Image (cartoon, helix red, strand yellow):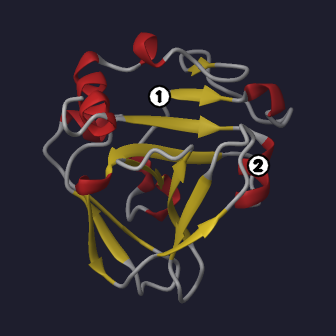
Amino acid sequence: MPIAESNSTLKGQCACGALRYELTQPPMFTHCCHCTQCQKLTGSAFALNTIIENDCIEILSGTVAVTPGPSESGRPHDIYRCPSCQTAVWSDYGGRPNYRFVRVGTLDDPSAIEPDVHIFTRSKLDWVVIPDAQKAFEIFYEVEEEWPPSMLKRREAALNPAGM
């Protein structure tokens, strides 16, 4: 996750350009998800999502429309889309109201973000090759074991904004 070690900000947009956004902090962690729902929703082999707090996503122009979607876990999945072109720009998986999963492909420079882990590899397409140096999990992983300590603190603050 090269951006996490710099003071750079990331910007992105939908396919038609009506919706522009900026990530005002480095993302906390990035998943490459190979679940069958991500395959269906993206029309691709996997989804690449980077996790960041809601208040670190600044909409520069346009608006988002929220649509419910399916998830492999069965938990709620809200997809935030450009109302003009329907590009999915971020999601809320599992009813986590204080952070989002930004679709890395919508960033102006998607090469700035690399996956920290590959998840749901049990449904990975056979031709997808995961580099040996990258961590991969058949389903999910223990967050406390994989996330860097500084990002765990941010995650905890996002999950418990009042310190409860």
Q: CA distance from mark 1 to mark 2?
A: 20 Å
Judge from the rendering whether residue 119 lies leftward or rightward of residue 144; answer left or right. right
User: Which of the pair 32/63 is nearer the observer?
Assistant: 63
Identify residue for label 2: 37
Amino acid type at image mark 2: Gln
Quarter of the image that includes the N terminus:
top left
Q: For the point 24% across and 54% down, which residue is it?
A: 56
User: Which of the pair 20/63 is nearer the observer?
Assistant: 63
Amino acid type at image mark 1: Asp
Q: Residue furthest right?
A: 126
User: Which of the pair 130/118 is nearer the observer?
Assistant: 118
User: Which of the pair 45/133 is nearer the observer?
Assistant: 45
Mark 2: which secondary structure?
helix
Q: Residue furthest left?
A: 7
Q: Residue 66: x percent and y percent?
A: 53, 71
Mark 1: which secondary structure?
loop
Identify residue for label 1: 116
- Dot 1: few (<14), some (14–19), or many (≥20) neighbours within 10 Å? some
Quarter of the figure with residue 117: top right
Q: For the point 64% across and 38% down, which residue is it?
A: 33
